[in-house]
Image (cartoon, rainbow, N blue to C red):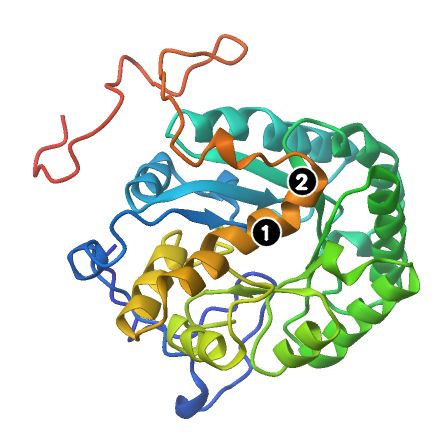
Amino acid sequence: MQQNHKNQEPNPSHFEESQGTSDQEVPTHRDLTWDEYRDTIQGMRFFDPHIHMTSRTTDDYQTMFDAGIVALIEPAFWLGQPRTGLSSFKDYYSSLVNWERFRSSQFGIRHYCTIGLNSREANNEPLAEQVMEILPLFLYKEGVVGVGEIGFDDQTAAEEKYYRAQLELAKQAKLPVQVHTPHRDKKHGTERSMAIALEHGFDPAWVIIDHNNEETVKSVLDQGFYAGFTIYPFTKMGNERMVKVVEQYGPERIMINSAADWGISDPLALPKTAALMKMRGISDETIRKVTYQNAIDAFGQSGQIHETDFANGLEIDQSQKMNGNTILRGGQQPRIAKESLFIN
């Protein structure tokens, strides 16, 4: 994890486009090497409530486990290109509640997910109508802790239509909601997202408004919602900015995530931010709340999260199989000595 991104252009990934920010406005995310923060966070446990492991490699799972990540939530997401039919949605949702859950367990990390029709995909209305019909088949599966990530991207009428429809599904299933807020015109999109949730009768404590920044956080907290923050290189939040937010607003109803996906992103954003908070003098209890406990409290309202299932680590048995398949390929050994120069 020692890549130097400092000389790269801003990355318009994760639904985002470059906003032409000035040098002074570019987030100040920077990589920390393992040696720099390992001792600082020794013994801490982390819960990443937003990461797209389908896009990540086995190496990421191993590195995350070594850094103290014991559990995560994988929201249903956009694959980077339009799906062409209902079957691809079925296969994707099925992988979130089956294979990815199994794969994560093989590396000692408890996997949960949220299921939903992504905002960008709501704009294909004929297909969206079909997807809405199958969502209840997955919302009641084991390990599904919310409806998400849903909300607005371009803030179209179709996005609002299916955001509202999925809020009603969440109410029926008694599940929390994970709301994606748009990058463009974020303040308006965030306020609109919250207003609609309240209009549908939601207790704000059951709604996690994600991808916040300094412009939106006060209103989200003042209205009683959970405020998620995504540490994502070059876009969204840098972890130095995140430290300042925690210093200003404290730990209540704030949670930090990586949203790592197929873009240039960092699955260790959570432990790195914890290390930076520790270095800046923030208390261990505050760090624990924003990197672990608040996510459990919010999504645990689903009744699907039991801390005892992962707090002391999972029993790893890589001889296990799912539908006859193992995570080991061609006689691989379970773990690789990552400090070694040689890859055998």
Distance of mark 1 from mark 2, alpha carbons?
24 Å
Residue at image position (64%, 51%) is: 298
Q: Is residue 251 above or below residue 317?
A: below
In front: label 1 or label 2: 2
Q: Which mark is residue 55?
A: none
Pointer 2: residues within 10 angstroms few (<14), some, or many (20+)? many
Residue 342 in view: yes
Q: Which residue is mark 1?
A: 80
The answer to whether residue 257 shows anywhere in this view is no
Circle 1 packing at 10 Å, graded few (<14), some (14-19), many (20+), is: few
Residue 302 vs residue 72, the one in the foreground: 302
SS category of the residue bearing label 2: strand
Disc count in the image? 2
Question: Residue 138: where, in percent of width, then height?
Answer: 75, 31
Q: How far from the left and from the top, in percent, is residue 4?
A: 25, 66
Residue 323 falls in image quadrant? top right
- Determine whether, in the image, residue 127 is placed left or right of residue 12: right
Residue at 51%, 39% (x, y): give it.
54
Whether tag 1 and tag 2 are in contact, CB under 8 A, the answer is no
- x then y, percent, for residue 295: 57, 52
Q: Is residue 155 left or right of residue 81?
A: right
- In this rendered view, identify the residue nearer to me: 84 or 299: 299
Q: Quadrant of residue 73?
A: top right
Kind of residue indicated by mark 2: Val
Circle nearer the N terminus (1, 2): 1
Where residue 344 sits: x, y (%)? Answer: 13, 25
Above or below — where is 244 with respect to 288? below
**Rendered residue at 81%/56% (across/down):** 123
Q: Is residue 343 left or right of residue 253?
A: left
Q: Amino acid at mark 1?
A: Gly
Q: Secondary structure at mark 1?
A: loop
Q: Which residue is tagged 2?
A: 145
